[in-house]
Image: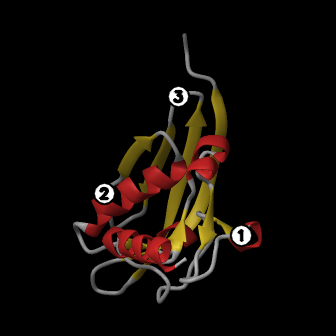
Amino acid sequence: MLAKVLMNEKHIVTAVDRLGNLHISTLLAKRTNDTCELTLRNDALEECHVSSDDFFSALRDLREQIEKTGWRLLVKGAARNVWASGMSRSMGGGIKAYQLEKGIASSLDRMVNIFEPADEAEVGTVAEQEAFFSDWVTSR
C-alpha cells in the first residue's frame, strides 16, 4: 500500500555557512501517514534529506548533518530556547514548538512554527538546544 501524502510544503529559509555567509535555501517538508521528510537545497551545499517520525526530530537530524560542515539554519526550530512537546509531535507532526523561558511553564501563546525565520543570534547548535531544554526542565 502506498503512503498517503498528508502535507507537501516548500519553505524559503536562510542558511549560514561556516564563514558567516547567508544563503537563501529551499526546505521541502513532506508528511505521509508513515514519515515526516525534510530536504534542504541551495547552490552552495550538497542536498540534504532526512526523515523521522515528526518534523521537529527531522529538523534536528538535518541540523546535525549540516552542523558537521559549519552550517546553520535560521529557523525558529533551531533556536536555543525552542522545543516541541511530545503532544505537539504526536498530534501535530512537530510543526509547532514552544519558545521556552527558564523558570516559566510553557504555554500555548508561546508556540511558534518551527519553519518561521529566526535571527542568527537566537539559533544554536543541536547540543545547545538540548542543554537549554534540560536546564529549562529543572528550572520550573
Q: Determine whether the residue tagged by mark 2 lies in a helix, strand or loop.
A: loop
The residue that mark 1 highlights is 107
Q: Where is residue 106, by image quadrant?
A: bottom right
Mark drawn on residue 124: none
Q: Position of residue 11 (x, y in %)?
A: 60, 59
Q: Position of residue 133 (x, y in %)?
A: 45, 71
Earlier in the chain: of badge 3 and badge 2, it is 3
Decide: few, some or many residues near mark 3? Use Cα within 10 Å; few <14, some 14-19, many ≥20. some
Task: Return the residue found at the far right.
Answer: 109
Q: Position of residue 69 (x, y in %)?
A: 23, 69
Per the model, the C-alpha gap separating discs 2 and 1 is 38 Å
Taking depth in this image into account, of 37 and 80 the one nearest to the observer is 80
For badge 3, the amino acid type reads: Asp
The residue that mark 3 highlights is 34
Q: Determine whether the residue tagged by mark 3 lies in a helix, strand or loop.
A: loop
Q: Where is residue 111, by image quadrant?
A: bottom right
Residue found 47% across the figure and 89% down from its top:
121
Query: In the rendered view of the protein, which quadrant contains the N terminus?
Result: top right
Above or below residue 64? Residue 29 is above
Taking depth in this image into account, of 69 and 111 the one nearest to the observer is 111
Q: Is residue 116 visible?
A: yes
The residue that mark 2 highlights is 46
Per the model, the C-alpha gap separating discs 3 and 2 is 26 Å
Closer to the eye: label 2 or 1: 1
Q: Where is residue 130, by image quadrant?
A: bottom left
Decide: few, some or many residues near mark 1? Use Cα within 10 Å; few <14, some 14-19, many ≥20. few
Closer to the eye: label 3 or 2: 3
For badge 2, the amino acid type reads: Glu
